[in-house]
Image (cartoon, rainbow, N blue to C red):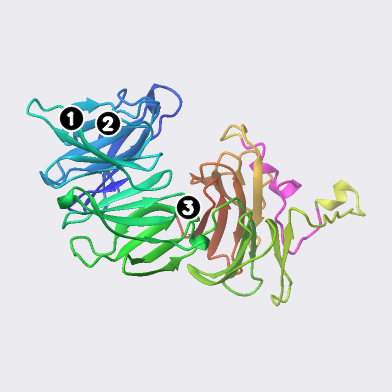
């Protein structure tokens, strides 16, 4: 994904899906309305688009894209018309990031830690002008600042380095992120166009750091970075807690992180004490408690539970045998609202569905959205039913939803 120099457009690369209609392509969309303005590259990319960059020389009229296929083909496009201007096979495979220089030359980075500079000859063909080793192993991000300084970030070595493009990419300085932050995933200047050197850095551990090469980087946003399976909402406050395989337990109030602490085990479940004064976490190495109901299954359907987070039951059967969507996946989570009038469910394909409760009819209507790349692990209403929290996907995505009238 790349922001246009005008900051009004974004280019994003799409991975190929199943069928002809789901071919890999590049999409240009508005940052204001999120509306798609242009789509190009259909049938030109093998598996997907691993990196994109707007040109600087002509006001961002060109887009450079990297094919996610085996050969990592670089292609240049006139994106307003979708015209392919040229292709080149890189000198090194597995290109991971790229940028345009101010004069139109192309800068690429690869999984071996090398930066390569391509220039254009009199016939319009690209050739390798220079190449140098910048990081240990993969380079995950490149940013060309307005004064000609190239910033590179390493995923394995956690280093951020500055290079002077006007002095044949002489190293200016470098810094290293703390181990707790993780490696560099992406870099962006805090104030584009200003030469103050302040940066935002997204890390491999789902943190966002801020700082510069002259001062330390501080965490401004925390996130889980492995499977996020534990979720518990406070019984009488707009707080909720999360825990995951990254061994972190976090307490949230709305969008604000109250605190995060690391424990010595992978967490898979959380539960508040009814008073709200204690929080229990279950680990992959902990005890398993089993409940044995004393009543028959027929009588159990009439029990009035104070909370209902089970994926099976008579009063939630409508989300399993619903005739309006194919049951090709498993219901992985469900939760009833505190007012006993709404039911949210999530499945292993990443779909969230909101039903009316009780939901016992196969004709039960619902609102549906797909927001996760993998299974929805947990979804819970907050205590006043105004908001709902969900976790899921391989990217450890945590989402806070507000319920509004249709």
Q: Is residue 86 above or below residue 175?
A: above
**Residue at 19% from the left image edge and 30% from the top image edge:** 127
Identify the residue under disc 3: 204
Which image quarter is the C terminus in? bottom left
Q: Position of residue 72 (x, y in %)?
A: 34, 30
How crowded pointer 2 is (Cα within 10 Å; few <14, some 14-19, many 20+) is rated as many
Q: Earlier in the sequence, mark 3 or mark 2?
A: 2
Real-space CA distance between mark 3 and mark 2, rounded to the nearest whole angstrom: 25 Å
Real-space CA distance between mark 1 and mark 3, rounded to the nearest whole angstrom: 33 Å
Residue 315 falls within the magenta-colored stretch: yes
Residue nearer the viewer, 43 or 264: 264
Identify the residue under disc 2: 74
Identify the residue under disc 1: 126
Q: Is residue 336 above or below residue 73?
A: below
**Residue at 28% from the left image edge and 26% from the top image edge:** 89
Magenta residues?
A: 302-322
User: What SS does tag 2 mark?
Assistant: strand
Choose top left, top right, bottom left or bottom right for residue 187. bottom left
């Amino acid at each position: 994904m790349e922001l246009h120099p005008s900051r009004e457009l974004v280019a994003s690369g799409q991975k190929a899906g199943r069928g002809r209609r789901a071919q890999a392509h590049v999409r240009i969309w508005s940052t204001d309305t999120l509306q798609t303005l242009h789509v190009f590259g259909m049938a030109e990319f093998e598996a997907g688009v691993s990196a994109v960059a707007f040109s600087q020389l002509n006001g961002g009229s060109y887009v450079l894209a990297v094919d996610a296929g085996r050969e990592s083909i670089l292609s240049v496009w006139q994106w307003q018309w979708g015209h392919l201007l040229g292709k080149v096979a890189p000198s090194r495979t597995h290109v991971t990031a790229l940028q345009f220089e101010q004069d139109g030359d192309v800068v690429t980075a690869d999984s071996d830690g090398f930066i390569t500079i391509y220039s254009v000859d009199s016939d319009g063909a690209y050739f390798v002008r220079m190449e140098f080793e910048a990081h240990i192993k993969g380079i995950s991000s490149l940013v060309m600042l307005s004064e000609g300084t190239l910033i590179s970030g390493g995923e394995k070595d956690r280093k951020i380095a500055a290079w002077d493009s006007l002095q044949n990419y002489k190293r200016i300085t470098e810094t290293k992120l703390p181990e707790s932050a993780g490696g560099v995933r992406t870099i962006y200047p805090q104030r584009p166009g200003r030469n103050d050197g302040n940066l935002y850095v997204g890390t491999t551990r789902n943190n966002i750091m801020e700082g510069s090469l002259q001062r330390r980087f501080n965490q401004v946003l925390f996130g889980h970075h492995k499977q996020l399976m534990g979720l518990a909402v406070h019984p009488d406050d707009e707080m909720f807690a999360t825990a995951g395989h990254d061994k972190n337990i976090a307490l949230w109030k709305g969008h604000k992180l109250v605190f995060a602490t690391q424990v010595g085990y992978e967490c898979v479940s959380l539960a508040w004490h009814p008073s709200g004064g204690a929080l229990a976490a279950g680990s992959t190495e902990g005890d398993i408690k089993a409940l044995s109901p004393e009543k028959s299954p027929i009588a159990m359907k009439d029990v009035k539970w104070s909370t209902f987070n089970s994926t099976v039951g008579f009063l939630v059967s409508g989300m399993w045998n619903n005739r309006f969507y194919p049951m090709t996946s498993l219901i992985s989570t469900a939760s009833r609202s505190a007012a006993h009038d709404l039911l949210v469910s999530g499945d292993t394909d990443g779909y969230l569905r909101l039903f009316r409760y009780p939901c016992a009819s196969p004709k039960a209507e619902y609102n549906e959205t797909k927001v996760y790349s993998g299974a929805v692990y947990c979804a819970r209403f907050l205590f006043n039913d105004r908001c709902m929290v969900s976790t899921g996907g391989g990217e450890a995505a945590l989402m806070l939803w507000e319920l509004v009238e249709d």
